[in-house]
Image: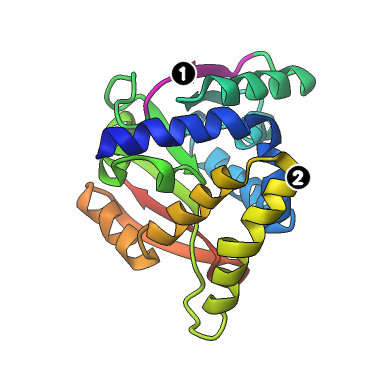
Amino acid sequence: MKDDKEEKVQGVFQRISGNYDIMNDIISVGLHRGWKDSLADEISQRGKCILDVCCGTGDLTVMLSKKDSSNEVIGLDFSQNMLSVAKERMSKNEIKDVELIQGNAMDLPFEDNRFDCAVISFGLRNVADYSKVISEMTRVIKKGGWVYCLEASYPDSKYIKPFFRLYFRYIMPRLAGLITGKQKEYEWLNESTELFLKKDELADLFKECGLANVSYKTYLLGSAALHKGQK
């Protein structure tokens, strides 16, 4: 079952890579850029050696590199098409010292205690095994290092949640279909959000994977959340 999800998700992201950034702006009304910029600020203050897991088209990867030119930043993603877009972004921003690797977030190709921080942004809900990814991120960070997860969610308010569900289940996929011609792929992205862990459940998972000082904060009425924990 997990292999089926992994194969399905990889196919989805291979197909939507060219329009992924545009749709992120539409879905979040451009707010995801500010969330990622603030996240990059915090991570850069935590350490110099940073892993961006499921880096996608590399927008956060670029931000992390730009915050401090002495940062060592590595981006990893399983979609070669996404990484191709990320490489173009690096070139446009004249960034030459970021390494981009094709790999599996559930089996990170790095030794233990390699990084100061590891971050995954809008990627965890799409992997086949959430626990395995957080465990792997915990493994590769140093003692005292931090794991971060910025991810889509649903508002906690019972009054607001139905409107978000209406938008993301019916309106957003059709809008994406008109813009990109790939409605089914965006139906999957909504489905992955609906099936994802609740905020408190993800916080508990961080603790189960060996992280301490676990906390989270929400954005846009709870439609996104940033979790963090320390090794």
In this rendering, is residue 213 above or below 71? below
Q: Measured along the vertical axis of the image, is residue 85 above or below residue 206?
A: above
Look at mark 2 in the image and give the residue it sits on: 179
Instruction: Locate residue 10 relative to residue 28 in the image: left or right.
Output: left
**Mark carried by residue 165:** none
Q: Is residue 174 left or right of residue 136?
A: right
Q: Secondary structure at mark 1?
A: strand
Q: Secondary structure at mark 2?
A: helix
Please, what is the three-letter code of the amino acid marked with disc 2?
A: Ile
Q: Over which residues does the magenta segment extend?
A: 97-104
Closer to the camera in the image, 106 or 164: 164
Q: Is residue 68 left or right of residue 112?
A: right
The answer to which quarter of the image holds residue 138 is top left
- Kindly tell me whether residue 226 is visible in this rendering: yes
Frontmost of labels 2 and 1 is 2
Q: Amino acid at mark 1?
A: Gln
The image quadrant that residue 224 belongs to is bottom right
User: In percent of the image, x 53 and y 42: which residue is there?
Assistant: 43
- Local packing at callout 1 (Cα closer than 10 Å; few below 14, some 14-19, many 20+) is some
Q: Are marks 2 and 1 in contact (CB under 8 Å)?
A: no
Q: Which of the 4 image quarters holds residue 174?
A: bottom right
Q: Position of residue 119 (x, y in %)?
A: 46, 40
* Residue found farthest to the top: 96
Q: Residue 105, percent across and down?
A: 37, 31
Q: Residue at x 33, y 20 (%)?
A: 110
Residue that mark 1 sits on: 102
